Image (cartoon, helix red, strand yellow):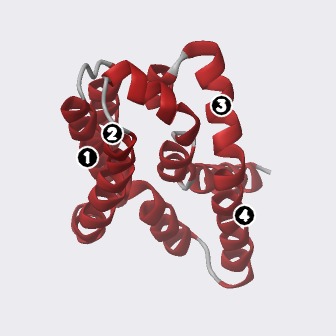
Amino acid sequence: MQNTTSKNTMIFLIVLMNIPAALALDQYAPSMPAMVHSLITSTASIQLSISVYMFACGILALFWGPLSDRFGRRPIFLISIPIFLIGSLFCIFATSIGMLLLGRIIQGFGIASCSFLGAAIMSDTFEGKMLNKVSSYFSAAYSLVPILAPVIGGYIQEWFGWRAKEV
């Protein structure tokens, strides 16, 4: 029973690792008009914050992978998540579009490890049919986030404002 519980916990954590990168991207859209107003900037500038986030994720993914092979998955995860949280703090307290862009870049640098670390841990831990099963859960979570995140983001925007979504 303990072994089954451990496997289920591991599957849950692997699937959970896949969610933050997409969530930080997709829950953002409903707040864009409020961000334009709050930061006294243009819609194009706020849209740029999405692009720099994606660019930072793409660039750092090239480095986090080899580093996780060299130093292990856990240390990279424990380094990258605080980087994401620091970027989130920059975004929360942004008083200008420049500070928001910097925060989104830092967020991208930090969160870039999550998706591939989940996939790497999945392939390190499981094999055969179990790997296929866990992979399908991983893919399902990744497919559902872009659908649910804007709805969640809209509610957060309505109840707490755009700064609450940056965490």
Q: Quadrant of the C terminus?
A: top left
Label 1 and label 2: CA atoms lie apart by: 9 Å
Q: CA distance from mark 1 to mark 3?
A: 23 Å
17 above or below 93? Answer: below
For marks 1 and 2, the one nearer the N-term is 2
Secondary structure of the residue carrying tag 1 is helix
Residue appearing at x 25%, y 65% in the figure = 59
Comparing marks 1 and 3, which lies closer to the viewer?
Answer: 3
| Residue ID for mark 4 | 140
- Identify the residue under disc 3: 154
Q: Are marks 1 and 3 in contact (CB under 8 Å)?
A: no
Viewer-closest of 27 and 137: 27
* Tag nearer the camera, 1 or 2: 1
Q: Which residue is mark 1?
A: 105
Q: Amino acid at mark 1?
A: Ile
Residue 123, numbered label = none
Question: Badges 3 and 4: C-beta atoms under 8 Å apart?
Answer: no
The image shows residue 100 at horizontal and vertical percentages of: 28, 33
Distance in Å between CA atoms under marks 3 and 4:
22 Å
Q: Amino acid at mark 4?
A: Ala
Q: Earlier in the sequence, mark 1 or mark 3?
A: 1
